Amino acid sequence: MSKNTFRDGIFDGKVLFITGGRTGIGYDIAKNMMQLGANAVIVGRDAEGLAKSAANLEREAGNGKKCIAAAADVRDKNQVRAAVSKTLEAFGKIDFVVCAAAGNFLVPIDGLSENGFKTVIDIDLLGTYNTIKATLHPLRETQGAYIHISATLHYRGTPYQPHVSAAKAGIDALSNVLAVEEGPRGIRSNVIAPGPIGETEGMKRLGTKGYDPRSVIPLGRQGYKQEISDAAVFLFSDAGKYITGQTLVVDGGHRHLTHASLPYPMMVLEPEKVKAMFQGKL
Ligand code: COA
C-alpha cells in the first residue's frame, strides 16, 4: 500500500530506532520505513525473536536496507542506553524514534495487584521515558522526530484497562511536553492512537470471538497494521513537517460512535462477561 502512496527512497539515509519492533504494529512500521529507504534498529526483550525479526525485515524490505536487533528491556534505562549506543556505532545517528513497546492484559482494578499495575506502567510509560531520555541528544543532532504508539482506551473509562489507560494517558502527556520543550531545537513529537487493529498482540489479548466490527466501527472493519504504519510514514515524512504535539487517531471513526461508545475491550468482550461485570461478579 505504501508503495502506491509514498515515493520510494523518501527515507534514504535515515535511521529508525523502534522499541517493540519485533512483532505487530512495531514490526510493520519498521518494514514500511525500511521499504521507503530507512535503516532500522529494533528493540525488545526477546533476543532470539528479535534477531529473527531483523532478518525477516531485511528480507521483506528487499532493497539492501539494514536492520539491527538490539535486545533490551525498555524498563531498564541502562539497557536502552546500550541499544542506543549500538545504533550509533552501526549507523552514526538516529533520525526517527518510535516507542511501540507495550504490555497488556485484561483485569479489573479490583483484581489488579500493585505489581501488575506497575509492570504495565513500567513497560509503557517508564519505557517511553527511558527511550526518550536515551535518544534525545542524538535526535537534537539530526532534528529528528518521535512517534509514540498510544491508544484510545483512556478517552473514556475502559473496563479492565486501568493500568494501560493510566500509562497511555501519561504517554500522551509526555509527548506533548516533549513537543513544546524540544520544538525550538527542531524535534517533533507526535502520538498515534490506533483503534482495533487486526492480527496484533493487543487484539489477541483484548478481543474475543464473534464480535461484529460493523456494529461498532463506522468504517465497518478492524484496521490493518499497514494503516498504522502508513500514518507513521506520513508523520515522519516531509508532509508532516509542521505537525507536532499532535495525536493522530487511526480507528475507523470508532471513538465517535456514541451508540456503541464502548472502547474495544468492552465491545469485544463476551456479553456474559460484560453482564457479570455490571453485576459486580467479575
Ligand atoms: N491478570 C492480572 N494480573 C496479571 C496478569 C493478568 N492477566 N498478567 C500478569 N499479571 C500480573 C502478575 O500477576 C504480576 O503481578 P504479581 O507479582 O502481583 O503476581 C505482574 O502482573 C507482572 O507479571 P509478569 O508475568 O511477571 O510480568 P512480565 O514482565 O513477565 O510480563 C506482561 C509483562 C504481563 C505485560 C506480559 O503480558 C507481556 O510481556 N506482554 C508483552 C506483550 C503485550 O502485552 N502486548 C500487547 C500490547 S497491547
Image (spheres, rainbow, N blue to C red):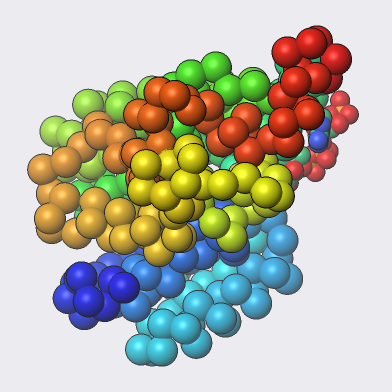
**Where residue 153 appears, x then y in whole percent?**
51, 29
Q: Residue at x 53, y 26 (%)?
A: 262
Residue situated in front as seen by the camera: 183 or 264 = 264
**Left/right of residue 158 with respect to residue 58 in the rendered view:** right
The part of the image, by quadrant, that contains residue 238 is bottom left
* Front residue of 208 and 241: 208
With respect to residue 46, does 254 lie above or below?
above
User: Residue 221: percent from the left, percent from the top?
Assistant: 45, 53
Regarding residue 282, the answer to whether it shows in the image is yes
Residue 54's quadrant in the figure? bottom right
Which residue is located at x 43 percent, y 41 percent? 217
**Quadrant location of the C terminus?**
top right
Spot occupied by residue 124 in the image (x, y as percentages of width and height): 57, 36
Residue at x 48%, y 52% (from the top left corner):
222
Residue at 59 percent across and 56 percent down: it is 200
For the image, the number of numbered tags is: 0
